[in-house]
C-alpha cells in the first residue's frame, strides 16, 4: 500500500471564516513515525491560517504523546484535525502538507551524526564547566535529518455573505 495523504472538511461552511479539516495519513509501509509536522499550502485565493493563527507554510505539531502516543512514546499520525481560518471573505483553495520522518530514518540519521561527530568534532571542557566544540577544518557538512513531504488533494474554502430572499 502506498503512502497517501487525504483531507476532508469536518465542520464549517460558506458563511464562516473557520473550517475544521481532517487529514488521513496512510503510512504503514514507512513503519512507525518518529515525527510528523503539518502546515497548509494556499494554492489560490485569499490568505488562510491554520492551528489558531499560524501562516501557511509554518509547520506545527498537531499531536501530543499524552493523547496519541503508545507505550513507547510514538504517536499515531493516521488522522489529525487541522483548524483553518480564511483571513477575509472570498474563495481559497488549499492543501494540507505533512513533513515526516520514520523511526528507522531518524535512527539512521542519529547514527550518521554520531559517526560524523566522532570523526570531526573535538569537545573541550573549559574551566567554567562549559563545553567548547571545535570542528575539523576538513570536515564535510554534518548529516541533515531528511524529512519526506506529502500533500493532500485540493480543498476549496469559501467565506461569503448570505442574502435575503
Image: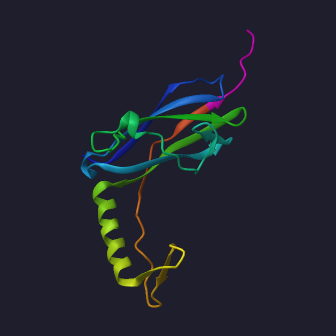
Is 127 contained in the magenta span?
A: no
- From the viewer's side, name the closer residue of 22 and 110: 110
Image-quadrant location for residue 93: top right
Quarter in which the C terminus is drawn: top right
Q: Residue furthest right?
A: 164
- Left or right of 13? Residue 152 is left
Region rendered in magenta: 158-165
> Is residue 164 on the magenta stretch?
yes
In the image, 152 versus 145, the foreground residue is: 145
- Residue furthest out toward the top: 165
Question: What is the number of callouts on the image?
Answer: 0
Q: Is residue 59 left or right of residue 87?
A: left
Above or below 34: residue 157: above
Q: Position of residue 1 (x, y in %)?
A: 24, 46
Q: Is residue 108 left or right of residue 41?
A: left
Magenta stretch: helix, strand or loop mostly: loop
The residue drawn where x is 27% and y is 58% is 104
Q: Residue furthest bottom?
A: 138
32 displayed left or right of 158: left
Q: Is residue 81 above or below residue 138?
A: above
Residue 78 screen position, x and y as percent: 35, 38
Q: Which residue occupies 25% across, 49% down?
A: 29
Amino acid at each position: 500500500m502506498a503512502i497517501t495523504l487525504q483531507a476532508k472538511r469536518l465542520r464549517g461552511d460558506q458563511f464562516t471564516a473557520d473550517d475544521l479539516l481532517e487529514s488521513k495519513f496512510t503510512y504503514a509501509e514507512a513503519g512507525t513515525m518518529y515525527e510528523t509536522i503539518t502546515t497548509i499550502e494556499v494554492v489560490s485565493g485569499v490568505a488562510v491560517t491554520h492551528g489558531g493563527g499560524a501562516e501557511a507554510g509554518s509547520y506545527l505539531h498537531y499531536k501530543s504523546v499524552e493523547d496519541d502516543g503508545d507505550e513507547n512514546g510514538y504517536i499515531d499520525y493516521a488522522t489529525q484535525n487541522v483548524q483553518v481560518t480564511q483571513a477575509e471573505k472570498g474563495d481559497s483553495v488549499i492543501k494540507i502538507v505533512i513533513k515526516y520522518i520514520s523511526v528507522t530514518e531518524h535512527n539512521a540519521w542519529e547514527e550518521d551524526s554520531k559517526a560524523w561527530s566522532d570523526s570531526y568534532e573535538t569537545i573541550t571542557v573549559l574551566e567554567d564547566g562549559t563545553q567548547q566544540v571545535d570542528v575539523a577544518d576538513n570536515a564535510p557538512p554534518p548529516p541533515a535529518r531528511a524529512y519526506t513531504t506529502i500533500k493532500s488533494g485540493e480543498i476549496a474554502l469559501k467565506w461569503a455573505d448570505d442574502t435575503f430572499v
